Amino acid sequence: MSEHSHAVPIPPGIQVAPSILAADFGALREQVATVIDAGARLIHVDVMDGHFVEPISVGAPVIEALAPQVHAAGGLLEAHLMVERPERHIEAIVAAGAQSLTLHAEATPQLALAIHRAREAGVGVGVAINPGTPAAAIEEVRADVDVALCMTVNPGWGGQPFIARSPEKIARLRALIGPDVALEVDGGIDVRSAPICAQAGASVFVAGAAIFAAPDPGAAYRQLVEALAGAGAPPRR
Ligand code: DX5
Ligand code: ZN
């Protein structure tokens, strides 16, 4: 369990986190309002720099635009930083209103320092790993994070198919982090893959296309929650 549990913003229980990457950016507030009204309280923002991943997405200004809306609903805004040297961006992303930062283990030779700096900034901290990175890459920092994020596609794009062998890795990660750290899956999550990930030990389910590419994002959010309700939660104390 994290020694910084007082700062944990993402609890270890089952949660669906809509990813705005697949939303209509011309109507972002309305799109976020739709999933908040449906019950979502964790909003996932993908920050991409064109280096760590090929595309460029959004950064602090978009987080700043959404933060008041998410906070007013009692929600949490999570920034998934797919950027090189994330430690250089912590201050700006936290100032914009993100309450949890997820950093990639592959993005910096100074992972422990980056996590430390995010802690110092007073936010929740997650560590993410790509499909090609072994679960053991988070071993030395697992006690310092609130969330481990397992990419279930190669990062950079929404709407990709779920990598079928991910559940084995999710189970290895759950064994590594223990029952009290949130385990997030991101990429290709839908009503079919989410319950499989839950069985393997995942607790937080990021979904972009499955929610925002659906004709009714609020209904799609609720369908995911319902699919997980019958899936069997990961082991808890
Ligand atoms: C991918 C991003 C994901 C993305 C998931 O690099 O980290 O958060 O939005 O999109 P879907 O759910 O469409 O696979
Ligand atoms: Zn993401």
Image: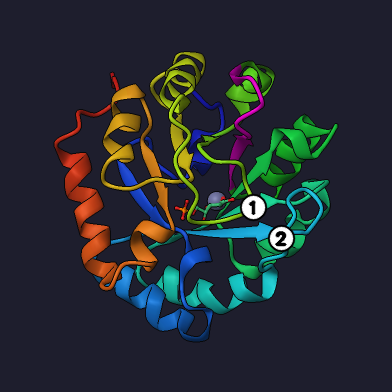
Picture quadrant of residue 189? top left
Task: Give the extent of the magenta segment.
Answer: 124-135
Q: Residue at x 81, y 48 (%)?
A: 84
* Residue at mark 1 to residue at mark 2: CA–CA distance: 6 Å
Residue at left offset 43%, top offset 46%: 188
**Residue at 43% across / 70% down in the picture?**
70
Q: How many marks?
A: 2
When asked about the image quadrant of residue 126, the answer is top right
Determine crowd level at label 1: few under 14, some 14-19, many 20+ residues with C-alpha closer than 10 A: many
Q: Amino acid at mark 1?
A: Gly
Tell me the crowding category of disc 2: few under 14, some 14 to 19, or many 20 or more residues within 10 angstroms, Cα based. some
Instruction: For the residues labelled 1 and 2, say whether their Cβ atoms are less than 8 Å apart.
Output: yes
Q: Residue 97: percent from the left, percent from the top?
A: 59, 66
Residue 20 x %, y %: 49, 66
Q: Could you tell me residue 142's position as x and y percent? A: 59, 23
**Of the residues shown, which amino acid type is indicated by label 2?**
Pro
Determine which residue is flagged by label 1.
Answer: 156
Q: Nearer the viewer, residue 71 or 34?
A: 34
Where residue 55 is drawn, which disc sits there? Answer: 2
Please say whether residue 161 is visible from this viewpoint. yes
Find the residue positioned furthest to the bottom: 26
Query: Is 7 positioned to the left or the right of 137 in the image?
Result: left
Helix, strand or loop status at disc 2: loop
CB at mark 1 closer than 8 A to ligand 1? yes
> Does any portion of residue 42 appear in the rendered image?
no
When the figure is inspected, residue 171 is found, relative to residue 50, above or below; the finding is above
Q: Position of residue 196 (x, y in %)?
A: 30, 30
Residue at the (60%, 31%) spot, across then down = 131
Q: In this rendering, would 178 be left or right of 198?
A: right
